[in-house]
Image (cartoon, helix red, strand yellow):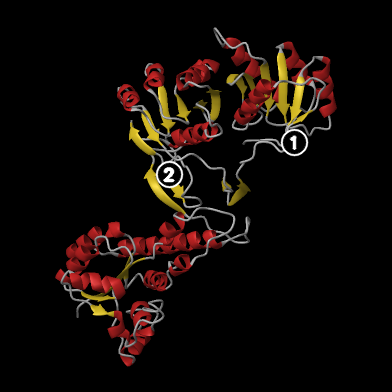
């Protein structure tokens, strides 16, 4: 008795060759709607689902395969005598393979601009697949007797295994797991798109594997890169196109993300250099070349082996300065042809293009714990207000410098201190257990700078409040002219008094930026 395959696919890629391969192996084909039409146009014989069920497609095709003569044929256990008797009683012939891919819901909603108000159009609703998902789940449940195929990339291997008689239980189980993973991903996309709650009682995260990585943070850890569908219209380093260099690593992606998010804070030519997920230099300037030179000057030792991000097309002039450095990766919206000619001389240097600028839309962030997960809104705000807390004031240029330093410190791991002159970081202290230690590291880095040309007032930014007045007292010793910090400590008065005593202007943002 010949085997029977039910084929109903939204994406017709490769389906004609696959169906022909099945027919050549003696399989019979049942199909529906557009799939049947496609197969017949290519001269392949198939039976319509309506001929099997004795019932026409109804409700504009919403109901096609939801019928006992289809699902009974799929779900019947071949070794169960009662199941076989019921099939015979109802004149149901078994279905031995189900080939389904689902309506393109993800592609449809990815083209809709993200907004606070969900655009639940008729097109969105009609691309929620019901019958296809039911077919996949039914076939996957009965995987011991039914082959279930949801991935176009599996067509070839299925035919090869059928020809060689190597369709074993492990292969069936792998297809089953893939089908349940596929429907879970599909349902997660729909749920996430329709959900209006920030923190629903139950939730699923839809992620799709993009790349198998060489290893994780360390060589003994396996790792892979996944793409979330949370906001496919936004800029993502996951979607950046690598145009040169060796393959990227887990740590590369962490640093590229940190660099890209920082330079997207600015509209002027910006350069950020990242090392171990922290900025070791950042600057903005009318000239991209100068922005890079200023960023590198902040900490050239740490820049060795770092990751660089630009928010504008990389120029030849900039590339000339980079070519003699050891840099892991560069990400930018684009590279000029001359810059590419120069940078591609370094065969291992990874170059990535991401023409989309990051938009500060509401987006959730996830961090895993052992058997758990933390979920929060993204840190897309800058400050709640900017209030002068001291007697001294500053001019508009210094205020712009304060805002620059504040944008940088937001991207430095806590406890974080940033020292800046104009629009150049001159010292960064990151990830310390005490704020005064972060300050001392920033000062140490500043004192290592050679030939600092800037004569702009020295600015200090702190990502969170000062628990004591010690940082302000130490800042006075190195000539800090103005400080930007969140305020919020019960000892704010100590810091403000110290600032007034040393003629330092202090501005409170009333918003902290812890980064862990």
Could you say whether the residue bearing mark 2 is in a helix, strand or loop?
strand
Q: Nearer the viewer, residue 174 or 496?
A: 496
Few, some or many residues within 10 Å of mark 2 (<14, 14–19, 20+): some
The x, y position of residue 179, in whole percent, is: 38, 64
- View extreme (bottom): residue: 89
Tell me the residue that label 1 is attached to: 510
Marks counted in the figure total 2
Furthest toward the top, the residue is 451
Q: Which of pointers 2 and 1 lies earlier in the amino acid sequence?
A: 2
On the image, the x and y values in percent for residue 89 come to 33, 92
Image quadrant for the N terminus? bottom left
Left/right placement of residue 200 relative to residue 150 reads: right
Query: Which numbered circle lies on residue 225?
Result: 2
* Contact check, label 2 and label 1, Cβ < 8 Å: no
Looking at the picture, how far across and down is residue 491, in whole percent?
Answer: 83, 29
CA gap, disc 2 to disc 1? 36 Å
In the picture, residue 43 is in which quadrant? bottom left
Identify the image quadrant of residue 451: top right
Mark 2 vs mark 1, foreground winner is: 1
Q: Does residue 438 appear in the picture of this structure?
A: no
Q: Is mark 1 on a helix, strand or loop?
A: loop
Q: Does residue 244 appear in this view?
A: yes
Determine whether, in the image, residue 33 is placed left or right of residue 327: left
Can you say whether 29 is above or below 476 in the image?
below
Q: Residue at x 18, y 76 (%)?
A: 45
Along the viewing direction, whichever of 284 and 484 lies nearer the viewer: 284
């Amino acid at each position: 008795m010949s085997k029977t395959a039910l084929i109903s696919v939204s994406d017709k890629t490769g389906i004609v060759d696959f169906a022909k391969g099945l027919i050549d192996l003696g399989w019979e084909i049942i199909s529906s709607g557009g799939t049947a039409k496609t197969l017949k146009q290519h001269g392949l014989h198939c039976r319509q689902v309506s001929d099997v069920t004795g019932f026409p497609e109804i409700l504009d095709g919403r109901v096609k395969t939801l019928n006992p003569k289809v699902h009974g044929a799929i779900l019947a256990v071949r070794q169960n005598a009662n199941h076989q008797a019921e099939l015979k009683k109802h004149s149901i012939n078994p279905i031995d393979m189900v080939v389904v891919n689902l309506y393109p819901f993800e592609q449809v909603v990815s083209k809709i601009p993200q907004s606070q108000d969900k655009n639940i159009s008729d097109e969105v609703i009609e691309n929620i697949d019901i019958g296809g998902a039911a077919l996949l789940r039914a076939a996957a449940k009965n995987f011991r007797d039914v082959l279930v195929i949801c991935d176009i990339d599996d067509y070839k291997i299925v035919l090869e295994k059928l020809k060689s008689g190597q369709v074993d239980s492990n292969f069936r189980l792998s297809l089953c797991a893939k089908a349940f993973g596929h429907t879970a991903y599909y349902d997660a996309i729909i749920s996430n798109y329709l959900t209006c709650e920030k923190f629903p009682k139950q939730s699923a995260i839809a992620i799709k594997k993009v790349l198998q990585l060489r290893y994780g943070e360390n060589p003994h850890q396996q790792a892979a890169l996944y793409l979330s569908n949370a906001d496919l219209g936004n800029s993502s380093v996951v979607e950046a196109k690598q145009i040169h260099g060796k393959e990227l690593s887990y740590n590369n992606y962490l640093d590229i993300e940190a660099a890209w998010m920082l330079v997207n804070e600015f509209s002027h030519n910006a350069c950020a250099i990242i090392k171990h997920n922290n900025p070791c230099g950042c600057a903005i300037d009318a000239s991209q070349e100068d922005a890079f030179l200023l960023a590198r000057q902040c900490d050239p030792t740490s820049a060795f082996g770092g990751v660089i991000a630009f928010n504008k097309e990389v120029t030849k002039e900039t590339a000339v300065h980079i070519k003699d450095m050891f840099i892991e990766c560069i990400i930018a919206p684009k590279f000029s042809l001359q810059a590419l000619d120069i940078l591609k001389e370094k065969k291992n240097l990874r170059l990535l293009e991401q023409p989309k600028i990051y938009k500060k839309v509401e987006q959730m962030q996830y961090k895993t714990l052992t058997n758990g997960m933390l979920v929060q809104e993204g840190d897309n705000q800058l400050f709640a207000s900017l209030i002068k807390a001291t007697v001294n004031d500053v001019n508009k240029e210094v205020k712009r410098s304060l805002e620059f330093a504040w944008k940088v410190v937001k991207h430095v791991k806590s406890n974080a201190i940033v020292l800046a002159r104009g629009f150049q970081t001159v010292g960064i202290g990151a990830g310390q257990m005490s704020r005064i230690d972060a300050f001392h590291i920033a000062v140490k880095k500043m004192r290592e700078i050679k030939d600092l040309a800037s004569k702009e007032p020295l600015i200090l930014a702190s990502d969170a409040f000062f628990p004591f007045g010690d940082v302000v007292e130490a800042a006075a010793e190195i000539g800090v002219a103005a400080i930007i910090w969140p305020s919020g400590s019960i000892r704010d008065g100590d810091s403000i008094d110290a600032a007034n005593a040393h003629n330092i202007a202090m501005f409170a943002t009333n918003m902290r930026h812890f980064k862990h």
